[in-house]
Amino acid sequence: MYEIEQSLRILEQLIPLYAPTNTTIMAHAPHYISAPKEDIMTQNYALMQHFVLVTQGMRPPKGEVYAPTESPKGELGFFIHSEGEPYPYRLKIRAPSFFHIGSLQDVLVGQYLADAVTIIGSSNAVFGEVDR
């Protein structure tokens, strides 16, 4: 309990060091993001942009991007290749369990078949995640 109290005191000392920020962050990119609902309901131009975005889809610029995110089992990565169309030309998802399954080809060599289930279970892989 004493450690929790000390941690709270440290956090209370750190709060004034952070400048207040604007909590309403919204990108202004009508080609990719719809306007706020209030604007769509009250402004004709925002309604038209929203209609075009919903009916024709978002058209991202041509190019490639890889976006890694952190997940409990490791890195979850998304690779997207766009040709400027509403749908990606190529989309690859790198699941963390796929990487863990790859290590089994080295670990299982020379092991008994009866031990394979235990070894695979200890790798904590989710096979449904690997299927992506």
Image (cartoon, grey):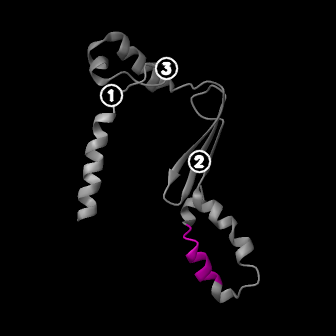
In the image, what residue occupies the spot 31% across and 19% down? 40
Cα gap from disc 3 to disc 1, whole angstroms? 26 Å
Q: Which comes sooner in the sequence, label 2 or label 3?
A: 3
Cα gap from disc 2 to disc 3, whole angstroms? 25 Å
Cα gap from disc 2 to disc 1, whole angstroms? 29 Å
Determine whether, in the image, residue 4 is placed left or right of residue 105: left
**Residue 31 at what x, y percent from top left?**
49, 20
Pick whichever, 64 or 127, lies toward us: 64
**Quick check: 15 above or below 125?**
above
Q: Residues within 10 Å of mark 3 (few under 14, many from 20)?
A: some
In the image, what residue occupies the spot 30% across and 12% down? 43
Secondary element at tag 2: strand
Determine whether, in the image, residue 84 is placed left or right of residue 69: right
Secondary element at tag 3: loop
Question: Residue 21's mark?
Answer: 1
Amino acid carrying mark 3 in the image: His
In the image, what residue occupies the spot 74% across and 73% down? 106
Amino acid carrying mark 2 in the image: Gly
- Residue reaching furthest to the right: 110
Residue under numbered circle 3: 31
Report the magenta residues as a range.
116-125
**Residue 39 at what x, y percent from top left?**
30, 17
Pick whichever, 75 or 91, lies toward us: 75
Determine whether, in the image, residue 115 is placed left or right of residue 29: right
Residue under numbered circle 2: 77
